[in-house]
Amino acid sequence: MQFKRILYLTFFVLGAQYLQGQAVSDLDYEGRQNYGLKMGMGINSMYGGKLQNPRPTVGFMAGLYIHSNPEKKRSPWGFQTGVDLRMRGSNFANAKATDTAINRAYTKISLMSLDLPLLVNYRLSKQRDKEIKQLQGGLQLGYNFNSVLYVGPQKRPLPTAFNTYNSIKEWDQLPLKMYDLQAVLGYQYRGESLGYSVSMKMGLLNLNNNFVIRGMTDTDGDGVNDKEVELISPTTDPLKEKPGTPQMIGTWSLELALVF
């Protein structure tokens, strides 16, 4: 009988110490920060019928975040936003072994964007746990302030002077719409000083802004550029698309970020 009492008391003390180690003290509980930094990388690509043979590429991001503190409330619901600088885009399997840097096949598009996530958090952990685990869902507004086109197996930009054979005016600021909107679904873990988030993002808008890259080419072999044609292939001529329904150029990404 005495042994059972000692055993129960031991289990009670160990359990209390464990719960005490998992709970936040009153001082820490009231002083939890609701802002920080995040840095990460993602697998990105484009989709839709306009750009042919898209393949994933790796991009990077860095940003600031701020969120409400649902762990201080009985309700598990909260809100998170911030500002992110992101590099994304897509590779394309259009190159051939005989291609050169001035060929007609595009092999990569890079997008640089400034993004504003608008997320709802749902806390999975207990209210006063030191480690916060939560689901996230919402929208991400994006401003594509630059886009870059690369061609050939070496993924090089086309010449940009009109006095160069098979040249275009510019290989950045592509005919893509500047604003994007992505649906976001993810998971976030926040420890005492470090955490991480995993999220899937899917573009909802068509970025196709009459996407055709035109330039001058020498059609008669006399060394003089004398005709403006579509240089980058394989794309679809807007004249062959249904009126008012340009073919889709969308974006998607799977992203992993560290949360500080």
Image: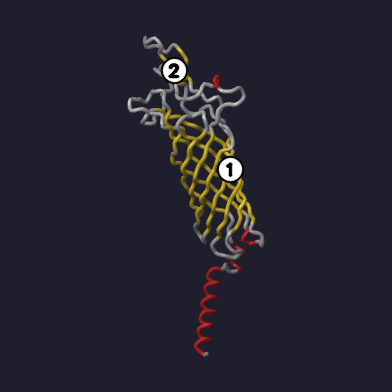
Separation of residues labelled 2 and 1 (CA atoms):
40 Å
Report if the CB atoms under discs 2 and 1 are less than 8 Å apart: no
Secondary element at tag 2? loop
The residue depicted at 37 percent of the width and 12 percent of the height is 223
Name the one closer to the observer, 180 or 12: 12
User: Is 158 situated left or right of 63 in this image?
Assistant: left
Q: How is the image coloured?
A: secondary structure
Residue placed furthest toward the left = 98
Rendered location of residue 151, percent (x, y): 41, 28
The residue depicted at 47 percent of the width and 16 percent of the height is 229
Name the residue carrying label 1.
Answer: 183
Which is in the foreground here, disc 2 or disc 1?
A: 1
* Label ID, residue 162: 2
Rendered location of residue 146, percent (x, y): 51, 33
Residue 100 position by quadrant: top left
Crowd tier of the residue under label 1, counting other residues whose Cα lies within 10 Å: few below 14, some 14–19, many 20 or above: some
Q: Amino acid at mark 2?
A: Phe
Marked residue nearer the N-terminal end (2 or 1): 2
Rendered location of residue 47, percent (x, y): 51, 35
Rendered location of residue 70, percent (x, y): 63, 58
**For residue 239, above or below residue 3:** above
Q: Amino acid at mark 1?
A: Ala
Residue 57 position by quadrant: top left
The residue depicted at 43 percent of the width and 34 percent of the height is 91
**For residue 230, above or below residue 130:** above
